[in-house]
Image: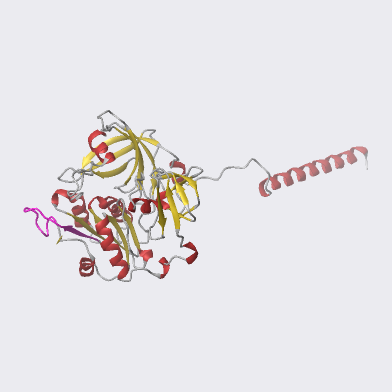
Amino acid sequence: MTALTLLAYISAAILLQVAVGVSIALWRRAHVAVPATPIAPVQRSSERLSWVGWRDFRVARREFEDAARSQCSFYLEPSDGVALPPFKPGQYLTFQLVCGTTDARGVAAPRSVIRCYSLSDKPNASTYRVTIKRATAPPNRPELPPGVSSSFFHDSVKIGDVLSVKAPAGNFYINGDSATQAVFIAGGIGVTPMVSMLQWCLAEQPTRIVHLYYGVRCSADHAFKAQLAGMAASNRNFRLHVVYSNPLSGDVVGTDFQHNGYIDIDLLRRTLPHGNHEFYVCGPSAMMESVVPSIVARGVPMSDVHFEAFGPATLRLPQTPEMVVAKDERVEADIRFARTGRTITWDGSDASLLEFAERNGIPVESGCRSGSCGSCETKLVSGEVRYSHPPDFEVSPGSCLMCVAKPVSALVLEA
């Protein structure tokens, strides 16, 4: 073998080795994990769109929903122009308001309040809608002042105004199981979350059977009248039952309303066909205290009865196995309200410290009543509490949310 031939063999071997090495490297790069800078997981669209804390919204439109002009819808657009996150139909928005009020001397004294109002439309990416009823003094207590926040919305909030709003929240919302018939029972302005649920069902689950029982005094208070009638006429799976307790002389049964009187268990028994039902109830205390226990007493599982009450409302439900409180959770403790100077014994009969305080005449600011808005946050001077469910609001150290808290021991509260 000549030197030239030997050199050619050596060169070919070197080139072959390089080619094999390159091939192996390329294969390893394609098939073997190489450490790299971690990449953050991709968020779902709703997580990217949602927000923490307060966000500015512009009032794009106002629209009265009843003949008496006591219920007004406010359409809200995000000031930053970013698309809105979807919400669960039935949830609410939390507002931070600065309401112009006067003190006892008639001097202007702006007051900051936090209030929650149910969303009254199905989810969309451009606007939110809330419908707010003007809260006036009850007929038997004309000396009481009107509602601070509802009066502010009706009298002062105009198109173009900017409001501070928290992201949709709340545990009262529709179950997405289309095989279950949804029964919505609403009294007065309690119809707002029901309209949200109803519109979502008709749009997303048009074959689902849904029932709405809606009680008001007369046609003047009948909110969303044309809208509800139109939905009932265009969808055979939507069964509408409007109940007037005090019809006007011109109100016609069968046209303006279907039933005279009040929503009660007898009406449900007569008009609700047998089937697999899930109940959603929202309204004033008197209706809640009548309807909800009656439904449960008829054997409907508590897991199929969802309700949201207005303001202070104590529902004495029949005891079922799932509602029995364990012995070690029954606490009898002295609750000291430092600011008012009263000490009252907690016996476990109230659903929360807020309900306990209200029943005993202790004034506590409140809003959502579900641990979301923080209105009832109170300094916990001493003692320990537990929560019925983890609050959405971030509680300050050394404080508690009275609307979802119960005592574990004797307490001293700054209230």
Is residue 74 at least partly visible in the picture? Answer: no
The x, y position of residue 197, in whole percent, is 31, 54
In the image, taking residue 42 as reference, residue 134 lies left or right, namely: left
The x, y position of residue 177, in whole percent, is 37, 61
Q: Quadrant of the C terminus?
A: top left
Q: Is residue 366 above or below residue 181?
A: above
The x, y position of residue 66, in whole percent, is 18, 46
How many numbered dots are placed on residues in this image?
A: 0
Name the foreground residue: 1 vs 20. Answer: 20
Name the foreground residue: 240 vs 286. Answer: 286
Residue lying furthest top: 107
Name the foreground residue: 246 vs 269. Answer: 246
Residue lying furthest left: 249
Q: Residue at x 26, y 38 (%)?
A: 153
In the image, taking residue 414 as reference, residue 281 lies left or right, namely: left
Query: Is residue 62 in the magenta section?
Result: no
* Range of magenta residues: 238-256
Q: Main secondary structure of the magenta part?
A: loop
- When asked about the image quadrant of residue 318, the answer is bottom left
Q: Residue at x 50, y 50 (%)?
A: 383
- When asked about the image quadrant of residue 352, the answer is bottom left
The x, y position of residue 367, in whole percent, is 35, 45
Q: Is residue 124 above or below residue 324?
A: above
Name the foreground residue: 333 vs 300. Answer: 333
